[in-house]
Amino acid sequence: MFTVLTRKGGDEEDVLVGQADTCATCDGTNTQCEQECMMEAATKEIEYFDDEELDAFRQRPADGYSDEEAEMFREVMYSMRQEEVADWNRSLILRGINVPDQLKDELIMLLGD
């Protein structure tokens, strides 16, 4: 996003000044923003969403969950506000937890809204 600042008088040209996105405004549609926010998040303490029980699934492949286990993720995902879902997904990634394949379409839908 850019804002045009104009200078008065003389032959000076308009200057484009970029407005920096922050991780608070990053919506996941800009891959550069998403990568930068992931790196920033990696330097901070990991945020939990009342989902500590999911730590038991660290390093489990996304296609290695039973339907009952995937339901545990679904319950957590739908218990939060939609604007928290991207942060929750980042938290899972930083904790080494893969989202079950059974939920990926739903997660992408929530991230896209």
Image (cartoon, helix red, strand yellow):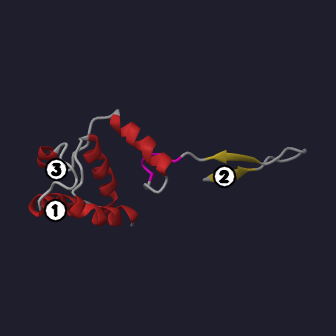
Please, which residue is most extreme toward the right here?
Answer: 10
Taking 16 as reference, is 71 above or below it? below
| Residue drawn 15% across the image and 49% down it | 54
Type of amino acid under label 2: Thr
Q: Earlier in the sequence, mark 3 or mark 2?
A: 2
Distance Cα–Cα, label 2 vs label 1: 42 Å
Rendering coords of residue 106 (x, y %) = 28, 66
C-beta proximity under 8 Å, tags 3 and 2:
no
Query: Which stretch appears magenta?
Result: 21-26
Rendering coords of residue 59 (x, y %) = 19, 43
Taking 78 as reference, is 87 above or below it? above
Q: Secondary structure at mark 1?
A: helix
Does the segment drawn in magenta span residue 29?
A: no
Image position of 100 (left or right of 22): left
Image position of 37 (left or right of 104): right
Q: Secondary structure at mark 2?
A: strand
Image position of 53 (left or right of 35): left
Front one among 63 and 82: 63
Q: Earlier in the sequence, mark 1 or mark 3?
A: 3
Residue designated by label 1: 75
Image position of 37 (left or right of 78): right
Please, which residue is most extreme toward the left here?
Answer: 68
Q: Residues within 10 Å of mark 2 (few under 14, many from 20)?
A: few
Rendering coords of residue 89 (x, y %) = 29, 51
Type of amino acid under label 1: Glu
Residue designated by label 3: 50
Check residue 3 in the rendering and tell me which mark sits there, or answer none.
Answer: 2
Q: Residues within 10 Å of mark 1 (few under 14, many from 20)?
A: few
Type of amino acid under label 3: Asp
Distance Cα–Cα, label 3 vs label 2: 40 Å
